[in-house]
Each structure stands twice: as structure tokens, then as C-alpha cells.
Image: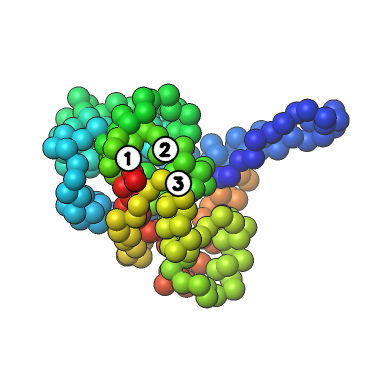
């Protein structure tokens, strides 16, 4: 789902035509990916008990922290955070489909008064400096690149504010070749935990702790519901290719989940 910015300057008409075609295909691809994930509680791997355990160890936050969930999807974390703290959560996502799902879920759970759904770009928030006590982002920072996301978000945090950010990470320095080849293509910037800790430090954070999401959570909370959803999709060439890619990702994870996965980085504004 990585998209490069397009610059139309200095390109011939035929080159521009090709780009327009490819942006159309890209838009179709994103729409198919959104469709595949619509109706699912989680749009990426995560686990509520795992998240609550992280929260239970955060001791420096105010009783009612000002919270943001960036790349919130349909609110897996935003709803949990609102419930946990009984405090307001600004929940941002670039997908209107997911934001509408979040609104419906918040209403169903009686949490509407605590959720502020924002359809927008998490890289372009015009919030005041220091206006967030707890910044949460699950499975979304990679869209900006981990370090870039941290640099953009750092000014939003209050003094000693906390950021909890999950990022695809290598758990080892010597992952098997097929896993390296796959991720070099899918997410070339994916780093080891040590590299990500260094990236966090460079971006103005100290690292309080890191936590690897257990592979069980991937299967039970994400891949299995996704597999069911695949069977309900209307098959077009583009959905077919999205399904094939997702199945390939699952096969790889089945074999190599000891070598990579989501690490949650608990960071404090330094
Ligand atoms: C893997 S999903 C995770 C969603 C949610 N955090 C969860 O765990 O269910 C990544 C989310 O990031 C959103 N996203 C991607 N780029 C974004 C951007 N620039 N601004 C806001 N949201 C973005 C996508 O629409 C998607 O909902």
C-alpha cells in the first residue's frame, strides 16, 4: 500500500498518461484492500489484553490523558483507550469507510461522547504543540515510515508524554532468505528492534520498553477473520490479486513468525 508522491513536472504526455493509469490502478487496489478489511474489528494484528497490559504499566500519565489514535481504522485501539481511561480520544484515519465504521461502533458501545472521529491525514495534523498526553498508533506508522512518523508526531506530545507505536520489526539479525526477500519488496525500511530503538532516540524519544505481539494474536484476531472475509468478497481481477498477496503474506508468517512481527515501542518524549 505504499504510494510514491507523483510530480508531473518535466514528464512527457505519454509518461503522464501512464502515471494516471497507474494511479487509477493504485486507487482501485486501495479500494479492494479497504473492501477486504471492511466489517473487521481489526485492520491489522493486535490484541486487547496485550494492549491493556501495556497500559497497566504506564504510570506517569494524568488520570484523564488527552489521547490520539493515529491510523485508527475502525477503532480497535481508540475504543479500548476511551473505555480504559474514560477520556476523549481523537481518532484519525484516511479511510472514510473505516471512520464511518468507528462512528457506528462507538455508538453501539455507548462511547460516542468520548470518540472524536477525524477523517484526515495523520501526517498533516494541525494540532497545537504539546496537546497530546498519550499517542497510540497500531499497524499504521509504516505508511509514513517509522522514523518519519515519529519525527512528525513528536511535537504533538506534551512534556514527558507517551507514545505507543507498533511497527513491523525483525526479531533477529539473521532472518531466513525468503522472509528477507519478501519484506525487502513489501517494506524495505523494516528495521530490527535495535534499529528502531535508535530511530526513536534520534526522533526525540527515550524508549521505556518494547513488547512483541505474540503470533497467536495475528492468527486469532486478524488472519482468521480476514480469511473468512475473503470468502465473502465479490471476485474481480483486482480483489483476486489482493487476496493472493494476503495469502502469500500469511504463508510467510506461518513459516517465519519467529523472525519478524509487530513490536510495540513504548516511548516517552525526551
Ligand atoms: C493496518 S491498518 C491498522 C488500523 C488500526 N490501527 C487497527 O489496528 O485496526 C492501517 C490504517 O492506517 C490508515 N492510514 C494509512 N495511511 C494513513 C494516513 N496518511 N493518515 C491516516 N490514516 C492512514 C489506513 O486507512 C488503515 O486504517
In the image, residue 54 sits, relative to residue 39, either above or below, namely: below
Mark 1 closeness class: few <14, some 14–19, many ≥20 residues within 10 Å: many
In the rendered structure, find residue 135 and report the number of the disc placed on it.
1
Residue 220 vertical position relative to residue 171 in the rendered view, above or below: above
Cβ atoms under marks 1 and 2 closer than 8 Å: yes
Query: Which of the marked residues, 2 or 3, is nearer the chain's N terminus?
Result: 2
Q: Which residue is drawn at 42% across and 51% down?
A: 200
Quadrant in which residue 57 is drawn: bottom left
Q: Where is residue 66 in the image (x, y as percent from the top left)?
A: 24, 32
Residue at 56%, 49% in the rendered image: 242
Label 1 residue SS: strand
Q: In this view, does 264 lie to the left or right of 113?
A: right
Viewer-side label of 2, 3: 3
In the drawing, what numbered circle is on residue 153?
A: 2
- 1 or 3: tag closer to the N-terminus: 1
Q: Would you identify the image quadrant in which residue 1 lies? A: top right
Distance of mark 1 from mark 3, alpha carbons? Answer: 15 Å
Amino acid at each position: 500500500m505504499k504510494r510514491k508522491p507523483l510530480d508531473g513536472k518535466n514528464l512527457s504526455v505519454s509518461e503522464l498518461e501512464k502515471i494516471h493509469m497507474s494511479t487509477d490502478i493504485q486507487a482501485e487496489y486501495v479500494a479492494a484492500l479497504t473492501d477486504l478489511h471492511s466489517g473487521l474489528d481489526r485492520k491489522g494484528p493486535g490484541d486487547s489484553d496485550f494492549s491493556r497490559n501495556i497500559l497497566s504499566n504506564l504510570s506517569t500519565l494524568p488520570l484523564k490523558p488527552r489521547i490520539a489514535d493515529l491510523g485508527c481504522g475502525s477503532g480497535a485501539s481508540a475504543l479500548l483507550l476511551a473505555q480504559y481511561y474514560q477520556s476523549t480520544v481523537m481518532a484519525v484515519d484516511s479511510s472514510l469507510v473505516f471512520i464511518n465504521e468507528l462512528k457506528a461502533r462507538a455508538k453501539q458501545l455507548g462511547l460516542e461522547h468520548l470518540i472524536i472521529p477525524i477523517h484526515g491525514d495523520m501526517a498533516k495534523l494541525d494540532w497545537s504543540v504539546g496537546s497530546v498526553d498519550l499517542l497510540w498508533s497500531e499497524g499504521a506508522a509504516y505508511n509514513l515510515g517509522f522514523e518519519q512518523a515519529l519525527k512528525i508526531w513528536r511535537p504533538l506530545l506534551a512534556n514527558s508524554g507517551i507514545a505507543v507505536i507498533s511497527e513491523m520489526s525483525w526479531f533477529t539479525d539473521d532472518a531466513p532468505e525468503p522472509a528477507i526477500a519478501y519484506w525487502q519488496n513489501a517494506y524495505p525500511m523494516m528495521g530490527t528492534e535495535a534499529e528502531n530503538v535508535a530511530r526513536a532516540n534520534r526522533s526525540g524519544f527515550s524508549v521505556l520498553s518494547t513488547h512483541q505481539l505474540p503470533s497467536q494474536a495475528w492468527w486469532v484476531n486478524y488472519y482468521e477473520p480476514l480469511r473468512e472475509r475473503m470468502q465473502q468478497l465479490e471476485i474481480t481481477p483486482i480483489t483476486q490479486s489482493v487476496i493472493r498477496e494476503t495469502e502469500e503474506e500469511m504463508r510467510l508468517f506461518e513459516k517465519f513468525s519467529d523472525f519478524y512481527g509487530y513490536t510495540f515501542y513504548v516511548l516517552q518524549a525526551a
